[in-house]
Image: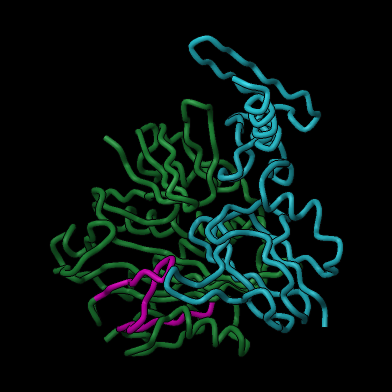
Chain colours: A green, B cyan
Amino acid sequence: MFSVGNFHNNLRTRVLGQSVRDFSVVSSTNDLARDWCARGAPDGALVIAEEQTAGRGRLNRKWLSEPGKNLTFSVVIRNRFPAALTNLAVVGTAVAVSAAIAEAFPVQTQIKWPNDVQIDGKKCCGILFETESSQAGVNNIIAGIGINVNQREFSGRYMTDPTSLSIELGYELSRELLLADILLQIEHELDALTESSGGVHLRYQQHLKDIGQPVSLTLHSEGEKVKGIAAGIDKTGALQIMTPDGLRRFAAGELTSQG
Amino acid sequence: MDIEQIKAILQLVADSGVAEVELEDEDFRMVVKTVSSQVVAPAPQPTHFYAQQGNAAAPQQAPAPQAAPSADNAPAQAAAAPAPEVNGVEVKAPIVGTFYAASSPESAPFVKVGDTVQKGDVLCIIEAMKLMNEIESEVSGVIKQILVDNAQPVQYDEPLFLVDPA
């Protein structure tokens, strides 16, 4: 079992993860975090579960994870950003996870735009942010994060080949220490964003896979595909692709490496 | 090519909004150019996001996102000229992204035309960067129009729904 005591002993954040609710089985940590948020959860509140029965990615794709082996959690981010900065909160979180893993372990992590964290082209982390907003601005963000830590075998069908840190490293990791590390990095990124948005897109680019490489982006509308060379992201987090028609920018789409 | 065919072609070109059409047959060549003031600069395609031709070094000099929806795409038209008989409050996109009428491809849409909604009810999701942004109604009332198609890109401040306030 995940030990909240052990986790708290190693946690060096100001707010992230200071309030925790841990569960053995939930539908989805995002759902519980959202409910808690509606009932007054503090900024940085953490919901963690050993097993999700309805873990999800975007478009309600399933997030599959072996119970008790990995990290599946959600963080409540309260009233921090104007709407324009929420994209960068996603970007910052991806950078934080990628950096936390790469700094703690001898593996090379990369981000597949917008926010999968991969090792050697295999996915070890998925991030899904959910928020409610009206024109008055963004209220609260629920940051759902799944990291494959100690799972050794993956069966079933995946959009991207999966891997885990344990598979890459050859040994079991402490999930408590890893989560404490990751939350500290996320907090740094979010704090940096609150103070000034400068820089996060540059840090992101250092982790971005496919930069300078041929890519194909499937837009959701009518399956239109855009092909070109990934050029980086702009200050809003949008992907820039050099196409035969010039440099174009995209806020959404399904990115595939070509070549 | 008879006069009726030429008329039909002219009408087709006018309706399509394209700036120039060239047709060539074995013994016939026809060039139609429209001079409407509508046709300025290459209009951004409605299927693209953000300003289209951003310059990496100076993205802020690209056309502002608000200016990006082209004059000839359907949602923008609906926005520019809401049917005069429908009074209502526009619910606009707070961010740039992809509009989803439902939470997943298999789910029923959050709302349909004619539905009664309360202030704070979720009307749709806009996705950008895997940020799934649930857009809430600003007002209580009845959905009069849905101005955007599912899975279409929307621009900042683009009207999404017309709600008749209760």
Can residue B11 be seen here?
yes
Which residue appears at 41% of the width and 35% of the height?
Answer: A227
Q: Position of residue A17 (x, y in %)?
A: 48, 77
| Residue A221 or residue A217, whichever sits in front | A221
Which residue appears at 53% of the width and 27% of the height?
Answer: A246
Outermost residue toward the top in this view: B27
Determine whether, in the image, residue A58 is placed left or right of residue B164: left
Residue B74 lies in the magenta stretch? no
Which residue appears at 52% of the width and 71% of the height?
Answer: B102
Q: Quadrant of residue B127?
A: bottom right
Residue A46 lies in the magenta stretch? yes
Q: Position of residue B67 (x, y in %)?
A: 74, 42
Rendered position, A209 above or below A17: above
Q: Position of residue B48 (x, y in %)?
A: 56, 43
Rendered position, A129 above or below B112: above
Can residue A88 be seen here?
no
| Residue A176 or residue A81, whichever sits in front | A81
Which residue appears at 34% of the width and 48% of the height?
Answer: A110
Rendered position, A40 above or below B110: below
| Residue B27 or residue B103, whichever sits in front | B27
